[in-house]
Amino acid sequence: MKPINISEKFGKFSEQWSPRQIAQVDNMQVILARLQGEFVWHKHDKEDELFQVVEGTLYMQFRDRTEVVNAGEIIVVPKGVEHNPTTKDGEEVLVLLFEKLSTAHTGNVVHERTKSEYPKI
Amino acid sequence: MKPINISEKFGKFSEQWSPRQIAQVDNMQVILARLQGEFVWHKHDKEDELFQVVEGTLYMQFRDRTEVVNAGEIIVVPKGVEHNPTTKDGEEVLVLLFEKLSTAHTGNVVHERTKSEYPKI
C-alpha cells in the first residue's frame, strides 16, 4: 500500500521487450515495458490487453490498419485480435500494460523474445 | 480498438466524485474521476482498487496513516482495507482507476455520493 512511481520504476531496467511487473490488482497485473522497433505478430485468445503510452508514440499494427497511440493515450486490444506493437524511427517507447496475470506477452506465438514470467520491480 | 486520450476524456465531464468509464479489459474497467475534498471511509470486501494520479496530489487515508500519491504515481488498495481518498487545499485531483466491473466506488457504504453505475464516455 505504498505509492509506486512509474518513472522511478522505468529507471530500474533498460532491457527492451522485457516487461517488469509493478503491481497486482485482483487477477490482473500492471507491467511496464520499453519498446523499440517491431515486436512479433500475436494474439491472446483469452485475454484483453490494455496499453497506456507513458512516453513516445506507439504504432499498434492490426492486420487491417495501424493505430497511432501517443503519450497519455490508451488502447485496448480485445482477446483474439492479432496485433504487433511497433515503434518508428528508432524511438524507444515506454508503455504501461494492464492484463491478466496469465497473459503471455507473445500470446499464441513462441518467440525468442517470449518471457515466461515478468520480474517484479 | 481506437486510442483513448485521457485528457480529452477528462474534458467531457466536470462533476466531482462521479466516475466515468473509459474502457473495459476483461472483467475490469478503467474509470476516470475528479476528486476534491474528502470522500467517505469505505472498503471493498472482494476487490482490489488501483488509483493512478493523473494530475494533482492525492492523500489516501488509511486508518493508521496517510499515503501521499503524486501525479505519475499509482497506489493499490487491497480488498478489505478501509480507505478514504482525500485532496488538500481545495485542489481538484484527477485520477484514473482500474478495478473490477463489480466494484462500487463507495464499497460497503451507501452514501449520498454512491453511484450505481458509471456512465461511459
Image (cartoon, coloured by chain):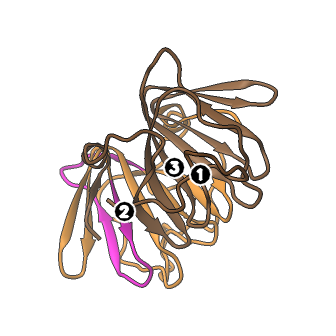
Chain colours: A orange, B brown
Sequence-first tag of 2 and 1: 1
Amino acid identity at mark 3: Leu
Q: Which of the two marks, 3 or 2, is nearer to us in this view?
A: 2
Q: Tell me which corner region of the image, top left, top right, bottom left or bottom right, holds residue A121.
A: top right
Was residue B26 drawn as part of the magenta stretch in this picture?
no
Mark 3 is surrounded, within 10 Å at the Cα level, by few (under 14), some (14 to 19) or many (20 or more) other residues, namely many
Q: Is residue A46 left or right of residue B13?
A: right
Q: Which of the two marks, 1 or 3, is nearer to us in this view?
A: 1
Q: Position of residue A86 (x, y in %)?
A: 28, 62
Residue located at (55% from left, 43% from top): B51
Mark 2 and mark 1: span between their CA atoms?
A: 15 Å
Instruction: Name the residue carrying label 1.
Output: B105
Mark 1 and mark 3: span between their CA atoms?
A: 10 Å
Sequence-first tag of 3 and 2: 3
Mark 2 is surrounded, within 10 Å at the Cα level, by few (under 14), some (14 to 19) or many (20 or more) other residues, namely few
Amino acid identity at mark 1: His
> Is A39 above or below relative to B93?
below
Was residue A82 drawn as part of the magenta stretch in this picture?
yes
Report the span colored magenta. Answer: A74-95
* Label placed on residue B120: 2
Q: Position of residue A110 (x, y in %)?
A: 51, 79
* Label placed on residue B97: 3
